[in-house]
Amino acid sequence: MHTIVRRTARGRPRLLVALGAALAVLLSGCAADDGPAEQAGAAPRPGGTLSFATDVEPACIDPAVSPLDVTALIDRNIFDSLVNLTPDGVIHPWLAQSWDISPDGLTYTFRLRSGVRFHDGATLDAAAVKASLDHVVDPKTKSQGAAGLMAAYKGSAAPDPTTVRITLSRPYAPFLQVLSTAYLGIQSPRSLTNPAAPCARPVGSGPFRFEKWTKKQSISLRRNPDYAWAPPTAAHDGPAHLDGLSIRFITENAVRVGALTSGQVDVIGSLPAANVRTVKRDGSLQLLRADAPGGVYSVFLNSGRGPFADERVRIAFQRSVDVEGLIKAIYFGQYHRAWGALSPNGVGYNRAVEGSWPRDPALANRLLDEAGWTGRDSDGVRTRNGTRLSLRWPVLTAKIREQRDILGEGIQAQARQVGIEIDRVGQDTGTYSKDVYAGNMDIWDTSNVRAEPDVLRTLFGSGQTLAKGGLNVFKLADRQIDTWLEQAVTTTDPAIRAARYGEIQKYLVEHALTLPMYVPTYLIGAEKKVHGVTFEAAAYPLFYDAWLGK
């Protein structure tokens, strides 16, 4: 978290109200791991198109709609935000050159910088910002993430072209962080008049313009030659060094790595941990990495139906899995085992959860016996009154990444050892979406990268169901969790915020509502001719300062 301040593009920050005072450094794990130092004294070379391959293709690149990490990665090149959050937790000006916050924390007044134009020629003004924010919360947008971040948004007004006044329904300490994300990037008001346009042809004011999307192949972006409003934290001002970006979608890990080693692409994201050694040994390649803040990759348990409605069964499942062993075996030491719902690389992490739930098959068996699952069928699956202890875990086949399929199989095998059957069902997008929205599953898995511990509200707050733009898939409605979440976002005391988020993490583990697995780590393999790639606070790579050497 950060201290909420008033900032100007050229002035020092002045404290207004400590709604989000500093708790800790947001992100310390962004680094070039084994890559070369920048060419001594070399100036960035303009020109060239950088080809970047990633493993997942979004269905929509309207940042207000899609909650996928890859959407933020792509859209950060196209869209600017009102403010900029750096990995050290500080909020800086961007499209807003300064701001004030009312004493009650309910009104944010932003003064916009002049001269900013969207890619379609429209001028950035207060009305454009209002239209963009209203688009996020409009039910017709069908936001799957951004609307949840804006749950406290009451409305905005444009008293003059350069002033935006945003009103909240309640104090919300993370609001500036929310506005800094790519999901709240400001869109051209003209593009929003066509409901289908933002998903397929987004229009922002960023350093790159959307050019073309060839489905299942690539997205092409071209340099915005008029760009002159980078955040003050960037390494340069003016247009991007690169002529363009080619973002290719290569789902197969081996094919993506092969494209890098053979020189077909310049950079690959989601480098498999098993291939890190290959990159390090290749003299023409470099490794970049960033440990992400926010919600770790976790397995969520549906406490609202079936066997998992019994806490004893949830704990038995939790204690049947050797998380440490699986993570070490599958990720070769490149990913760290998670103990709680929050990443230790972000603020609000509770170290008390570490070591609090080791694998314990004996305890798991005892709890299952107590819950009445005492029988065994011919397959070794536990039964109760003739019913098998079988759990349903649908999987979206097209979006599997980071070897989560192998990890899921490991979880499945270890749970089977105590008599729990897990039915992992591979599905297409349409079938999977229906099951997720209906909550027709016992297990669901995801990670949610965000440089703010309020990500716990997105995942577990009762008001954050899918229908309301959140990710509370199982519609958990726990009064204690809701109370802690409300206290955390409305208090002006950073110590109270940290304590409440810490209590939530402990509670989730104690009641086995989630099975944290690993801390998301963004691994990048790149040719050594690639320079200037950095990471934003949420650990996505940034290409504005990137350039191609010889």
Image: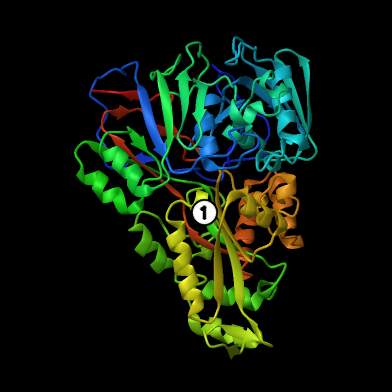
Tell me residue 335's x, y (percent). 40, 55
Task: Confirm whether residue 302 shows in the render.
Answer: yes
Q: Residue at x 55, y 75 (%)?
A: 421
Q: Amino acid at mark 1?
A: Thr
In the image, taking residue 169 as reference, residue 365 lies left or right, namely: left
Q: Quadrant of residue 383?
A: bottom right
Q: Which residue is mark 1?
A: 397
Quadrant that contains the C terminus: top left
In the image, taking residue 332 as reference, residue 187 lies left or right, namely: right
Tell me residue 177's x, y (percent). 61, 36
Residue sticking out furthest to the bottom = 375
Tell me residue 154's x, y (percent). 80, 34
| Camera-side residue of 373 and 322 | 373
Task: Confirm whether residue 543 shows in the render.
Answer: no
Q: Quadrant of residue 248?
A: top left
Report helix, strand or loop for mark 1.
helix
| Camera-side residue of 211 and 539 | 211
Q: How many marks?
A: 1
Quadrant that contains the N terminus: top right
Q: Residue at x 60, y 22 (%)?
A: 203
Describe the colour scheme in one phrase.
rainbow
In the image, taking residue 507 as reference, residue 142 lies left or right, namely: right
Quick check: 222 above or below 411?
Answer: above
Q: Residue at x 64, y 78 (%)?
A: 312
Q: Residues within 10 Å of mark 1 (few under 14, many from 20)?
A: some
Quick check: 332 above or below 162?
Answer: below
Tell me residue 343's x, y (percent). 51, 53
Quick check: 519 above or below 367?
Answer: above
| Camera-side residue of 140 and 24 | 140
